[in-house]
Amino acid sequence: MFNDLRYGIRMLLKSPGFTTIAVLTLALGIGANTALFSVIKGVLLRPLPYPDPDQLVMLWESNPRLGFDQDLVTGRSFTQWKDQNRVFEQMAFWPSWFGTGHFTVMGREGRELVTGEYASASLFPLLGVKPILGRTFLPEEDQQGGNRVVVIGHGLWQRRFGADPNVLGQTLKIDRDGLLDWTIIGVMPPGFQFPGKAELWLPAGWMGIGLLREYEGMVHYYNVVARLRPGVTLEQARGEINTIQRQIAEQCSISS
């Protein structure tokens, strides 16, 4: 551990400018209702493989009731942040509860447990990454009862389909709440795995993951990522989101 610590310090000292930015980012602190951090997270020495990565941020809520300074975001908060903010170009989410991150893929090649995510349609445009084949989700596909479509990663495309350039329109059988065929609409470029090691993505709304249901104002389900508008600082963004969050708290107090 101490060797790793010394190595990390030496690497940070070699890049004093970046180190200063990283330290300032981590020192922003936690707002009264919402915590806002850079998506840089702990990977300080490797730039994110997306356009203008310094504009990408992760948004969290505090959860005083459970004693969490940093918690996932409720559906109600995400909806109001997205609709009312003026500091972000785009916002996207993916859910996080037991079982959302892995899928069993079926086929002639046998069964394979694949890391994947339910992703909102805005996630790929927000990150600025385009598929090498096909497209990503349309907004109308990101809702309950929408088209049963799937975007796959480059590695999965190679393993399960032999890098077939005619893969679009073919089906991928996913053992999820019963075997279902999902139509492949896109293949992401080599190296793209977000979040984590995801290799396939399903529309978040298809399984009925709604953002406006009444109880979702109480349940912290969602990871939220956003892209800052040019010229907007983290401090400005945090201030506006905290203002919106205080309004949400006041509305909840009145309604209760």
Image (cartoon, grey):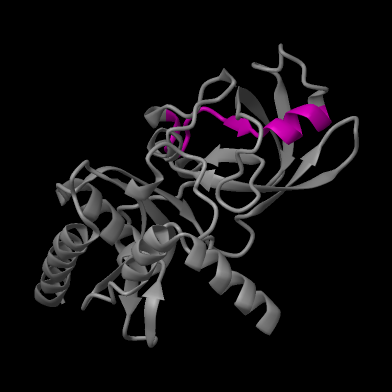
Does residue 89 appear left or right of residue 154 in this picture?
A: left
On screen, 131 above or below 233?
Answer: above
For residue 11, what is the image quadrant?
bottom right
Q: Quadrant of the N terminus?
A: bottom right
Does residue 189 appear left or right of residue 225 in this picture?
A: right
For residue 97, what is the image quadrant?
bottom right
The span picked out in magenta is 141-160
Q: Position of residue 174 (x, y in %)?
A: 72, 39
On screen, 50 above or below 59?
Answer: above
Q: Residue furthest top?
A: 166
Does residue 241 appear left or right of residue 160 in this picture?
A: left
Q: Quadrant of the C terminus?
A: bottom left
Residue at (39, 75) in percent of width and height = 70
Residue at (54, 58) in percent of width and height = 45
Q: Position of residue 148 (x, y in %)?
A: 57, 30
Q: Nearer the viewer, residue 161 or 171?
A: 161
Does residue 38 appear left or right of residue 131 in this picture?
A: left
Q: Nearer the viewer, residue 190 or 86?
A: 190
Q: Residue furthest right?
A: 109
Q: Is residue 155 magenta?
A: yes
Q: Position of residue 28 (x, y in %)?
A: 28, 72
Q: Position of residue 109 (x, y in %)?
A: 90, 33
Residue at (39, 82) in percent of width and height = 68
Residue at (48, 32) in percent of width and height = 129
